[in-house]
Image (cartoon, grey):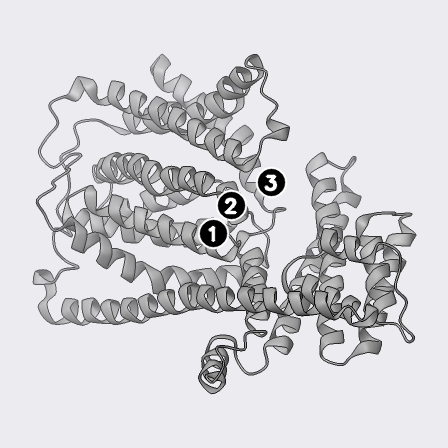
Amino acid sequence: MTLKRLILGLLTVFLVVFFIGPSLLGSWQQPQIQSRLELYQTNLLLHATEWQGEPGEEANSKSLQDALIGTEPLKNAQKQYQEAREQAETNLAKAKAQAEVLPAKTEQLETTITQLEDFINQADLRLGILQAKQGERKTAVETWQSVIQRLEAKNSNSQSLKITEVLLGLWSNPPQILPNSEATIKKSLDGWFRDRALSKLYYLQQREEALAELVAAEQEMAEQAVLKLAIVGAVPTLGLLIGVGLLLFLLIQRAIKGKDSLLAQNGDLTWSTPWDGEIILQVFVAGFFLMQILVSILVLPITVKLLNFDTANFDLRSKALLVFVNYLLVAAAALLVLYVSIKPFLPLPEGWFRFKLLDKWLLWGFGGYLAALPLVILISLINQRIWQGQGGSNPLLSLALEAKDLVALAIFFVTAAIAAPIFEEILFRGFLLPSLTRYLPVWGAIIASSLLFAIAHLSLSEVLPLTILGIVLGVVYSRSRNLLAPIFLHSLWNSGTLISLFILGGGM
């Protein structure tokens, strides 16, 4: 064994034991972005329930409203919050059980327990408002009393305790309006829940003008909510239906035409790979994973500290810019390692790193996107059952969900929809997939490269969906033999995800 192979082997073990493994295991305790998305969509549905439409068009508005939000939106919203709360309780019990067997609580575990407890209290606050809105006043009061009991047992004097006492007072019999109720409601609640609490307060205070202004503002918000629901619901549904039809067409064509079908095109054609597994390991160990550690944990934090930037007080725009710079540095370093690794083998055999502009890459990319929709959605539903809301997600998604700044959104878009597809497709489809065909058939190389692509995102809950997406990307590249096709597909996927997050988060 050469010294180089020994170093690569030791580096691989080091990365698996101290970076990849702990990152994946650590993500198990983190919530999925999907759980938050479902509640954001539920909140949009609640806003839409207040929409009355234009005068004289109430019947048409009611029909559209029913089509978008269903006939029992409040019950459905209550069910959604109850399920999210039960899931949080289950995960809290697991986290506490894990804390009991550990010699000392880790900071991450303590944070997870605190976040889950806060979420349960916040869910109960909103469940109480939903119950009160449906005439279940006594049940709502009991729900809020349970929150107060939990907070008082922890000697908490938090904002959650103050808002719970305000809500309990408003819906008590007789009602009791606590001092600073309006300010507490505006500070502690948002969206439909804030408006319901304010509406109750203004009604009790007989503030007709404030109530009228609130109703007018609600109508504007409700109209926007209906539009957002149409975008995040109707557009993906249409794409899903087209995708199912496309998959059926491709499978039928494959059965009828065999090797002359689109799915079989270039299916068995391997690449001529002039390097061995040592170069593959070098590119991914030294170029991808090691560079992530050096840039993200050492270079960038030290640089930021030397420049006297306080990242703890960064606004969303600054956070977005930091993510973008970090990604560019990692990509540049990894691509440099890739170039240095394959430079001795230049010029490469035909078919490597092809970017052919005058080709059918748009059709392959868009078709692959439509085909990926039903496959990834199906596996994501199964995934939700497996991980029950845990397993972590890409932190960029959480930041994008908060984005109400167009500049921040533009930076996120450039990072996720331009930089990421170009870099990741060059590395995983342009280099890894063809390299693996030296040892595996094309279908085996597609699966192996897709699995590594999924693992590289370092979130357990994303491994299955991203593996499926990676397989579609691999099929598109191996059939089209043009890197522009998977780059376009990847860009469409990330763009759709980002736009949905921005809409649901209230940025549009």
Instruction: Out of 443 and 213, give the one closest to the viewer.
Output: 213
Q: Is residue 168 left or right of residue 253?
A: right
At which x and y percent is residue 103? Answer: 79, 35
Amino acid, disc 2: Ala
Judge whether 195 appears above or below 265 on screen: below
- Name which of mark 3 and mark 2 comes first in the sequence: 3
Name the mark nearer the viewer: 3 or 2: 2
Instruction: In this rendered view, identify the residue nearer to me: 272 or 409.
Output: 409
Instruction: Label 2: state its secondary structure.
Output: loop
Asked whether the viewer can see residue 456, the reply is: no
Q: Which residue is mark 1?
A: 502
Q: Label 1's element?
A: helix
Q: Are marks 2 and 1 in contact (CB under 8 Å)?
A: yes
**Label ID, residue 124:** none
The residue beneath circle 3 is 26
Position of 246 with respect to 140 (left or right) is left
Number of the label disc, if any, that sits on residue 403: 2
- Quick one: SS at disc 3? helix
